[in-house]
Image (tube, helix red, strand yellow):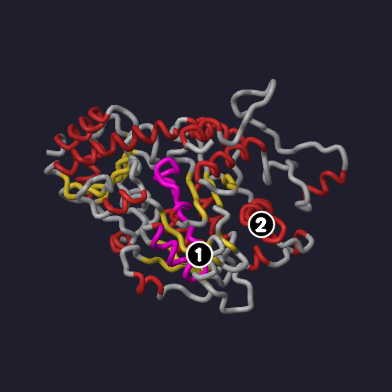
Amino acid sequence: MKNVETLCVHGGYKATKGEPQQLPIIQSTTFKYDTSEQMARLFDLKDDGYFYTRLANPTNDAVAKKIAALEGGVGAVLTSSGQAANFYAIFNICESGDHFITSNTIYGGTFNLFGVTMKKLGIECTFVDPDWDDETIEKCFKPNTKCFFGETISNPGGNVFDIERFAKMAHKHGVPLIVDNTFATPINCRPFEWGCDIVTHSTTKYMDGHATQVGGCVVDSGNFDWETCTHNGDSSLFNLQSSLPKYPGLTTPDESYHGLTYTKAFGKMAYCTKLVSQLMRDLGSIPAPMNSFLLNLGLETLALRMKQHCANAQKVAEWLEKNDKVAWVNYCGLPSNKYYALGQKYLPNGSCGVIAFGLKGTREDAIKFMDNLEFISIVTHVADARTCILHPASHTHRQMSDEQLREAGVAPDLVRLSVGIENADDIIADIQNAMEKMN
C-alpha cells in the first residue's frame, strides 16, 4: 500500500481469520507471560512484546504504525497530547545545557513550552523569524545546538515554513529538522520528502477531526545518522569537529539498560526506541487505548475530509479577500498571498482549512463579530469537522503582550477561522450576517 487514501483505511492493522475487522480496543494495563525469563527479556529490550501499557499497547501501536506509514517514516510513538509530542521530540535529544532553534511563528502553547518551561529544565531556545536571511539565522547556531523546529503551516498565523531551506541549514550544522505537520497532515504534505528528519502531530486536530480525543504523535524518518550527525548518510554536509558525541543519549551506553547503546542495538529505530524506553518509562504521557481507537476512526476519513476542508477554505478565503470589512487575509491558496509560491511547492493539492484574517476596526470589533455568529462556534479547538473561530490575542495567546504577539507573527487583530466540512455557502452566509450586525 502506497497511496495515502488506502493507508488511511488499512494501514497499521490487518485482520486475519476470525479476528475483528475493526481495530480492537485492548483496554488492559498489563499482559501475561508464562515465565519470569520471558518478562525479563522484555524489560532488557531483548524481545519485542507487550507487558505494560505505559510502554506499549497493541491498539496504540497499530495507530502509530498507520501514522508512520502515512508520513513515510520508520516508526512513530503516540502521546497523550500534541504538546507532549513536541516536548518529547525535543527532550529525546536535548539535555540540560543544550540549545535548539525554533521558528517564532509557532503555536502559542508551544512557544511557552519552549521559551519558559524547557528553560527551567536547562534547555535554551532561540526564536528566529523564518523570513530572516540565511546568514542571520545561521548566526544563531551554537556548538550545543541540537535541533531546529518549525511548523509546516503556522498556528494561528497560517505562514508556510520553507522545509527544504531549513532542512539544508540544519544539516549543514549537523542537527535534525523537526517539523510539526499538524495543519497540513500527511495528506497534503510529507515533510520527510523535503529533508525533514522528525515530524510531530497534534492528533487532536485534523487526524481525529471530530473533537473526540486529545493526542499527539512523534514520527522518525530514520534518515538522520545520530553518530555522524548527517542526514541520510550525506557526509558532505557536516563534519564532526569534536571527539565528544553530539547525541550521547543515543550513541553512548545507557546504564539504566545494562549499558545498551540505542544506535548500535536498534539502528534506524534508535530514536523511537529511546523515546519509549526512557521518556515514556519515566514520564508517561501515553494515550488511552480508547483514545487511539477514536483517533483511528478519524484517520480512516482523513483524506476525504482534507479535500473538503481545503475546497471550502479556498472559497471562504476568496470571499473574505474581496470583502470591504476585511483588512487582510492570510491563506496560502490565494495567488496574492505572500506564501503562495511556498504553498504551491509544498502543498500543491491544498493546505488546510485554517484562515487567518483581520477585520477593519479594533480588537473589540473582532470580538463583537464573533459573538454575532450563529452556527460557527467560538472554541479553543481548531481543525474540526465543524467550522470554528478564535481570537488568539484574547484567548490562546492572551498571556502575551502586543509586542510579543507581533514577534510571534500573531497580529492583535488576527481572527483564526477553521473552516469545516459544512456547505461553504452556509459558512459564508454566517460570516456575512455577523458582519452586517456590527453596523
Instruction: Indicate the quadrant containing the C terminus: top left, top right, bottom left or bottom right.
Output: top left
Residue 9 disc label:
none
Lateral position of residue 259 relative to residue 289, left or right? right
Residue 147 disc label:
1
Asked whether the viewer can see residue 120, the reply is: no
Real-space Cα distance between discs 2 and 1? 20 Å
Residue 166 locus on image (x, y percent): 41, 62
As for residue 397 lying within the magenta part, the answer is: no
Disc 1 is placed on an element classified as strand
Asked whether the viewer can see residue 35, the reply is: yes
Q: Looking at the rendering, which quadrant does residue 134 occupy? A: bottom left
Q: Looking at the rendering, which quadrant does residue 252 occupy? A: bottom right
Disc 2 is placed on an element classified as helix
Along the viewing direction, whichever of 402 and 210 lies nearer the viewer: 210
Amino acid residing under circle 1: Cys
Amino acid residing under circle 2: Gly
User: Who comes first in sequence, dot 2 or dot 1?
Assistant: 1
Lateral position of residue 279 relative to residue 48, left or right? left
At horizontal 25% and vertical 49% (from top left) the residue drawn is: 330
Residue 342 locus on image (x, y percent): 31, 53
Report the residue marked by disc 2: 267
- Magenta segment range? 164-193
